[in-house]
């Protein structure tokens, strides 16, 4: 009976995690739709994460334990959460929204999949976690996939600016992932506190930056609906549900499910944004997807135990 209950709970967690990745994948489509209606990119990003922050506030102030932790935050914790908010929300999300205004959704998704590769390099350089032979295979496949995807190298001027913004987003995303891991492992703060505070600081700064550099533009009903859905469902709700699945799923399962976003975004962009892919680009995406999975999951392969020795 217990095994059956555990099995049902596990299946439910898998389905919930897949729902979250689908919601996160649709974000790219919704953002592209919003950008096509001349919604200022940085302001768009700022509105999304500022509203998402306000959606998370009740989970903090209405929970006595979370409220007590928030009131007791040290100056150091505030500084660390501010740095994380600027890195992950102001810079990473701002750069992604700018690059989405200039690049196909599948292209940006492919580039952002290089984050695990950069994080693996960081671990190797700092000797926290030496890069294994199997990881090098994954890195090779990832780079090969990117080369296959982008060849022949004939990039329009507008897309060059998009690629530069994507590179900034990639570096900031990788750095914030490393820093976020450090904060979560050393500060002993609950994930909701880390997310709410860093999102509030980063989102508000992003919104102010967008307002001063781009203005608000003229927001119609469709744009407000997109912003509201992204903030409430694809950010606040999806984050909460994903954290719940982490209580049941293993790291391997979560990584594999999260890896399905790359093909999901490519398919959704083809269906709803008229961004078709040729055989060469599909092959490149497959190589990048397999490569990044190997980089993240190398320690779980039986052969890796022999390689490490």
Image (tube, rainbow, N blue to C red):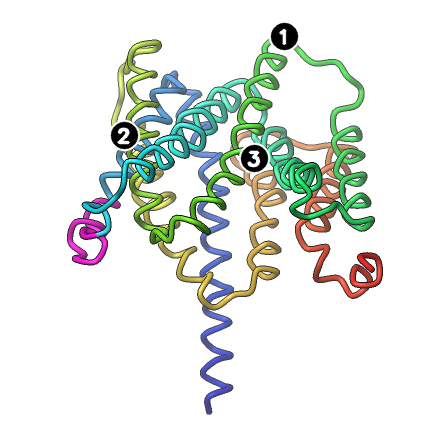
State the residue at coordinates (68%, 48%).
Answer: 129
| Picture quadrant of residue 80 | top left
Q: Which residues are magenta?
A: 56-68
Q: Which residue is mark 3?
A: 174
**In which quadrant of the rendered view does residue 127 lie?**
top right
Q: Quadrant of the C terminus?
A: bottom right
What whole-number distance in Å separates the C-alpha atoms at marks 2 and 3? 30 Å
Residue at image coords 74%, 33%: 281
* Mark sitting earlier along the chain (1/2): 1
**Circle 3: element type:** helix
Q: Is residue 62 magenta-colored?
A: yes
Which residue in the protein does label 1 denote? 157
Say which label, 3 or 1, has the lower sequence index.
1
Q: Which residue is mark 2?
A: 224
- Dot 2 or dot 3, earlier in sequence: 3
In the drawing, does residue 33 fall left or right of residue 257?
A: left
Residue depicted at x 50% and y 42%: 25
The percent coordinates of residue 109 (x first, y second) are: 59, 34
Q: Give the x, y percent position of residue 104.
A: 59, 26
Q: Label 2: state its secondary structure.
A: helix
Please tell me how crowded label 2 is: few (under 14), some (14-19), or many (20+) other residues with Cα within 10 Å: some
Q: Is residue 259 above or below residue 154?
A: below
Q: Position of residue 10 (x, y in %)?
A: 50, 72
Membership of 145 in magenta stretch: no
* In this view, the mark in front (3 or 1): 3
Q: Nearer the viewer, residue 243 or 161?
A: 243
């Amino acid at each position: 009976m217990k095994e059956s209950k555990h099995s049902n709970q596990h299946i439910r967690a898998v389905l919930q995690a897949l729902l979250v990745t689908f919601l996160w994948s649709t974000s790219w489509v919704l953002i592209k739709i919003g950008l096509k209606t001349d919604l200022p990119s940085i302001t768009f990003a700022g509105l999304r994460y500022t509203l998402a922050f306000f959606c998370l506030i009740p989970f903090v102030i209405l929970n006595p334990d979370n409220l007590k932790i928030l009131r007791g935050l040290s100056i150091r914790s505030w500084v660390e959460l501010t740095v994380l908010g600027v890195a992950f929300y102001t810079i990473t999300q701002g750069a992604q929204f700018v690059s989405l205004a200039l690049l196909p959704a599948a292209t940006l998704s492919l580039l952002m999949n290089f984050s695990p590769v950069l994080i693996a390099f960081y671990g190797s350089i700092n000797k926290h976690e030496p890069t294994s032979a199997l990881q090098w295979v994954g890195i090779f496949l990832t780079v090969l996939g990117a080369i296959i995807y982008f060849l022949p190298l004939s990039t329009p001027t507008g897309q060059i600016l998009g690629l530069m913004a994507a590179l900034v987003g990639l570096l900031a995303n990788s750095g914030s992932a490393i820093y976020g891991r450090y904060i979560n492992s050393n500060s002993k703060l609950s994930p909701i506190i880390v997310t709410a505070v860093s999102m509030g600081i980063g989102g508000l700064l992003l919104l102010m930056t967008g307002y001063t550099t781009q203005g608000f533009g003229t927001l119609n009903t469709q744009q407000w609906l997109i912003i509201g859905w992204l903030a409430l469902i694809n950010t606040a709700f999806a984050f909460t549900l994903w954290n719940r699945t982490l209580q049941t799923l293993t790291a391997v399962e979560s990584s594999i499910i999260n890896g399905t976003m790359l093909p999901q975004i490519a398919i959704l962009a083809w269906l709803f944004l008229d961004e078709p892919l040729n055989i060469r680009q599909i092959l490149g995406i497959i190589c990048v997807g397999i490569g990044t999975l190997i980089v993240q999951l190398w320690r779980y392969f039986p052969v890796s135990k022999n390689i490490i020795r």
